[in-house]
Each structure stands twice: as C-alpha cells, then as structure tokens.
Image (cartoon, rainbow, N blue to C red):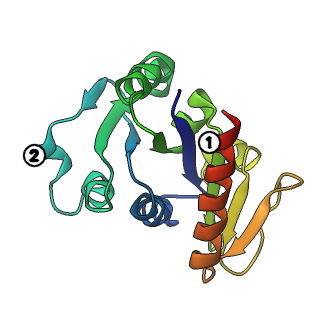
C-alpha cells in the first residue's frame, strides 16, 4: 500500500507551515516528513540526524513532533522533480508522508493540501499555485483571494477543529486506498 501524502504550503516564510506540520505529526503514527528548501546551485537529501536535530531547525521540530523519519531536501526548483521523487521513495515504506514547501507540493501532487495563509498581507509567488490546490485553508482574519471551491476553511484559532478534520479525512482516505 502506498503512503498517503499531505502537503503543507503557505503564503510566506513564517506563516505557520511548520507549526501545523508539527501538530499534525503529533497525532499520526508511522509518518515521515520532507522539508524542502530552495537553493541556487546544489542538490541534496539530508538524513543525518545530527544535522536534522540542530536547535532552531524546522527539521528538528518535525522530529520532535514524532515523525518516524525526516528528510531535508535542498535544490534549485529546476532540479526538484527528480530529487523530490527520490526523497518520497525513501519514505515509501511509511504510513504517510508530510511534505512542507510550496514548490515541492506542486511537483509531488499530494493527496491532501493544507495552505496556511497567515495574516494574508503578503504572498510569495509560489504560494498562489499551492493555494489553488488547497483542500484546507487556515487563515487569521481575512480570507485570501483564489480559494478553490469546496476547500474547508479554518481560522488560526481553530487548531483542534482543523486537526480533527484532517485526521478524520486521513482515516477515510486510508480506507479508500
């Protein structure tokens, strides 16, 4: 059985992607996570626990949240299709994979996409496309423009309600695979 893939994207750096990724991982067992960082030249998949566990890193937050395995993918967007598929293959034995990063989401086409809009005052260029793929949109005060029809909407303060919905969806998803 293939793993379920959840994508977590956001409007900008600091919108809350890693916070929600961590909250989701705390509720799931047997899941892995991929953190994508865009670089200008080099390509790497890091699975070295010492590097991933460095204080202050998003990868450490994912590990501390209970991810069974975490990979840190770094590459230019032009090299991402091959490297992200390779990383997902390295986690294919797990129940599910949570992937954080707008460009990686566009390449991997997850089963379920969570978009964190934050304060809706700024949007990275890569965010607009991911918002159009969103199954859930988490927002603070104002809804962003471009939300797909049928997307579930949750305010930032509705964390538990949002997480309950995601876990319920995942149970149904697993039954249908």
- Residue 88: which quarter of the image? top left
The quadrant in which the C terminus is found is top right
Q: Nearer the viewer, mark 1 or mark 2?
A: 1
Q: Position of residue 32 (x, y in %)?
A: 37, 43
Q: Please determine whether, in this image, residue 117 is positioned above or below residue 62.
A: below
Residue plotted at (15% across, 55% down): 54
Mark 1 falls on what kind of element?
Answer: helix
Residue plotted at (63% across, 80% down): 158
- Neighbor class of circle 2 (other Cα within 10 Å; few <14, some 14-19, many 20+) is few
Q: Position of residue 74 (x, y in %)?
A: 34, 33
The circle drawn on residue 50 is 2
Q: Is residue 144 visible?
A: no
Residue plotted at (33% across, 55% down): 62
Q: Is residue 112 visible?
A: yes
Q: Position of residue 70 (x, y in %)?
A: 30, 42
**3, 139: nearer the viewer:** 3
Mark 2 falls on what kind of element?
Answer: helix
Distance of label 1 from label 2 (alpha carbons): 33 Å
Q: Position of residue 136 (x, y in %)?
A: 70, 59
Looking at the image, residue 78 sits to the left or right of residue 155; the answer is: left
- Neighbor class of circle 1 (other Cα within 10 Å; few <14, some 14-19, many 20+) is some
**119, 160: nearer the viewer:** 160
Report which residue position mark 1 lands on: 174
Looking at the image, residue 138 sits to the left or right of residue 14; the answer is: right
């Amino acid at each position: 059985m293939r793993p379920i893939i959840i994508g977590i994207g956001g409007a900008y750096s600091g919108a809350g992607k890693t916070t929600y990724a961590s909250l989701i991982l705390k509720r799931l067992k047997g899941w892995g996570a991929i953190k994508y960082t865009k670089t200008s030249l080099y390509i790497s998949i890091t699975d070295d626990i010492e590097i991933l566990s460095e204080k202050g890193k998003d990868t450490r937050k994912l590990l501390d949240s209970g991810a069974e395995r975490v990979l840190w993918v770094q590459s230019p967007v032009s090299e991402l299709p091959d490297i992200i598929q390779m990383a997902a293959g390295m986690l294919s034995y797990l129940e599910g994979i949570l992937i954080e990063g707008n460009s990686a989401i566009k390449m991997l086409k997850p089963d379920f996409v969570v978009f964190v809009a934050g304060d809706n005052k700024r949007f990275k260029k890569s965010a607009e496309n991911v918002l159009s793929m969103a199954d859930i949109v988490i927002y603070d005060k104002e809804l962003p423009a471009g939300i797909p029809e049928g997307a579930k909407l949750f305010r930032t303060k509705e964390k538990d309600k949002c997480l309950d919905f995601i876990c319920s969806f995942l149970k149904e998803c697993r039954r249908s695979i």
